[in-house]
Amino acid sequence: MAFPRTCAGLAVLLLIGLLSIAAIFAVMTFGPTLAHGTKVQHVNGKVLKIVRPDRDFTFKTAKGEILQFQCRNQCRASAGHLQRHINEKASTDVYFNQGPNNTLLVIDVD
């Protein structure tokens, strides 16, 4: 080896890069479970409209399914945040629990 310090430096940078990628994938995989609990379900799509003043909303999933969500006391989404997603037609992640009578109770909207 002609340049042992250069090789050592490259090895350290490679190790840091691999550890960073592993940490990112771990957070992507386990982050929602840690933040919202193990029984929470997740769906991605777009908010179509807010149907009531208490932040209930109509949602279209990425697969085209239309869902009605109830955003009650435990919901972490403001009406302004939901309206911004509607105006921008932004992709939205909804974390929810199944309630009584098959209602979908929102935990978080992002």
Image (spheres, rainbow, N blue to C red):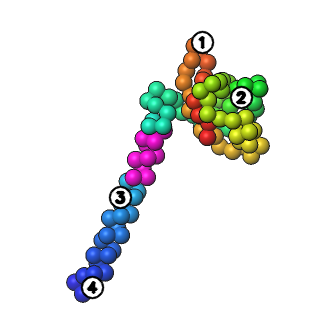
Q: Tell me which label, 3 or 2, sits earlier in the chain.
A: 3
> Relative to 76, is 83 on the left or the right?
right
Magenta segment: does it hold 26?
yes
Residue position for label 3 = 19
> Relative to 55, is 102 on the left or the right?
left
The residue most toward the left is 1
User: Looking at the image, is mark 1 or mark 2 nearer the viewer?
Assistant: 2
- Quarter of image, res 64: top right
Residue type at numbered disc 4? Phe
Residue 85 is situated, as x and y percent measured from the top left of the image, at 71, 42
In the rendered structure, which segment of residues is drawn in magenta?
23-32
What crowding class fits label 1: few (fewer than 14 Cα within 10 Å), some (14-19), or many (20 or more)?
Answer: few
What crowding class fits label 3: few (fewer than 14 Cα within 10 Å), some (14-19), or many (20 or more)?
Answer: few
Residue 52 visible from this viewpoint: yes
The residue at the point 33 percent across, 74 percent down is: 10
Residue position for label 1 = 101
Residue type at numbered disc 2? Arg
Q: In what element is the residue under mark 3?
A: helix
Q: Are marks 1 and 4 in contact (CB under 8 Å)?
A: no
The residue at the point 59 percent across, 16 percent down is: 102
Q: Tell me which label, 1 or 4, sits earlier in the chain.
A: 4
Q: Tell me which label, 3 or 1, sits earlier in the chain.
A: 3
In the depicted structure, whether residue 40 falls above or below residue 14: above
- Quarter of image, res 99: top right
Residue position for label 2 = 55
Residue 106 visible from this viewpoint: no
Q: Are marks 3 and 1 in contact (CB under 8 Å)?
A: no
Q: In what element is the residue under mark 4?
A: loop
* Measured Cα–Cα span from mark 1 to mark 4: 69 Å
User: Looking at the image, is mark 3 or mark 2 nearer the viewer?
Assistant: 2
